[in-house]
DNA sequence: CCATAATAGTTACATATGTAACTAATAGCT
DNA sequence: AGCTATTAGTTACATATGTAACTATTATGG
């Protein structure tokens, strides 16, 4: 019987390739706001979510940025301590609390957004406009597929 | 003067989208070999690199899997303790040590590879063959671009 | 050769992250 | 109303990871 064992070429293995690409992109971006603004990745994402959709509860933030409630709780605690966001307990359901950026938070958010968008733009310069769109669409379909597979292990 | 502040749509922001996709794919894959085989992500990658290119030194493994030497050192220590890899100090340069899978490591590797490839295949089912190829190519170009930007901050 | 630098790898410390247990408040059922 | 189940959020503990300092060994320039 012949040996039919398969070969895993790590460098052509999709999950691995995605991991490498994401890692370098995330690190680059992180350098742009971690040092200058002292934010962690999760803190920045919380701010980005609030900058766009506030007011949100911590749970809603978690859904927006696909982050579990513990991570959100920690990020929110740090942002509150620094006065970058505000929390207001819901009077009709005191488990919930609405979060939004403070004035200082809005100011920082407004300074970071152009930096983030500029990085994205420079990254995208490697692709033609129609390629960007196509890549986006393929990402969407892979994500949808990955979510399906997650529920059918 | 009008307000020209830009808006960051997190859900359309490439670094964010990549991060979400990679996270769900990595978690799915991790579930497939973490529980059954008790490996961390880094340990599995070290095994995958050795399965394909052994013998390698720890540094060479790190280059293959884009992982810093500390992470590799820790993964190697764990794999050695479990007897999944073997280390042989180079006699002409005793700083270096060649690593390769042990018999037990090869056996485990051979069991994991089909599982990993099957997952990749199921993930790819969301895309037509020519789309897969295109996606791969676009990933490559984005990665190249990201690497360039990393050196030109 | 000898002093210094560079390289391979490990260890130590500070942070970050995940899992599970916990508190507090509300909803739902009888 | 009163018991139980859910939900929002926090805390605690165990692991994981990154940065920097360290050891051991080899390379290099004078």
Image (cartoon, coloured by chain):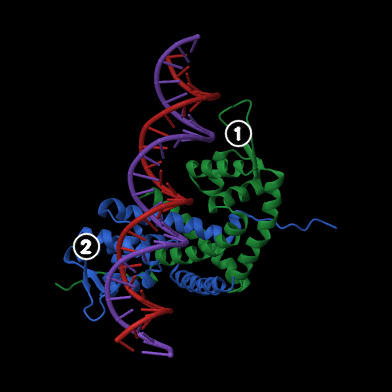
Chain colours: A green, B blue, C red, D purple
Chain letter for mark 2, please: B
Q: Distance between the Cα atoms at labels 1 and 2? A: 50 Å
Q: Quadrant of residue C11?
A: bottom left
Q: Vertical placement of A94 versus A16: above or below?
A: above
The location of residue A139, given as percent across then percent down, is: 51, 62
Q: Quadrant of residue B44?
A: bottom left
Q: Is residue B113 visible?
A: yes
Quadrant, the C terminus of chain B = bottom right
Judging by the rendered image, the residue that carries numbered circle 1 is A97
Q: Vertical placement of A119 versus C25: above or below?
A: below
Judging by the rendered image, the residue that carries numbered circle 2 is B84
Q: As drawn, is A24 to the left or to the right of A55? A: left
Q: As drawn, is B57 to the left or to the right of B20? A: left
The location of residue D6, given as percent across then percent down, is: 46, 30
Near-viewer residue (B35 or B111): B35
- Callout 2 secondary element: loop
Number of marks drawn: 2
Task: Count residues near mark 2 (Cα–Cα under 10 Å), then give few for <14, some for 14-19, many for 20+.
Answer: many
Q: As drawn, is B39 to the left or to the right of A67? A: left
Q: Quadrant of residue B72?
A: bottom left
- Callout 1 secondary element: strand
Q: Vertical placement of A107 versus A2: above or below?
A: above
């Amino acid at each position: 019987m012949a040996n039919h064992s398969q070969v895993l070429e790590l460098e052509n293995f999709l999950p691995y390739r995605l991991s490498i690409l994401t890692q370098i992109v995330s690190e680059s971006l992180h350098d742009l706001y971690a040092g200058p603004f002292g934010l962690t990745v999760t803190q920045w994402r919380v701010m980005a979510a609030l900058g766009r959709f506030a007011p949100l509860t911590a749970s809603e933030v978690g859904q927006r940025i696909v982050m579990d409630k513990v991570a959100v709780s920690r990020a929110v605690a740090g942002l509150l301590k620094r006065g970058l966001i505000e929390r207001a307990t819901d009077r009709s359901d005191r488990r919930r609390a609405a979060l939004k950026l403070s004035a200082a938070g809005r100011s920082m958010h407004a300074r970071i957004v152009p930096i983030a968008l500029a990085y994205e733009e420079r990254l995208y310069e490697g692709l033609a406009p129609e390629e960007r769109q196509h890549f986006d669409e393929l990402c969407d379909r892979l994500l949808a597929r990955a979510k399906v597979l997650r529920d059918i292990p």
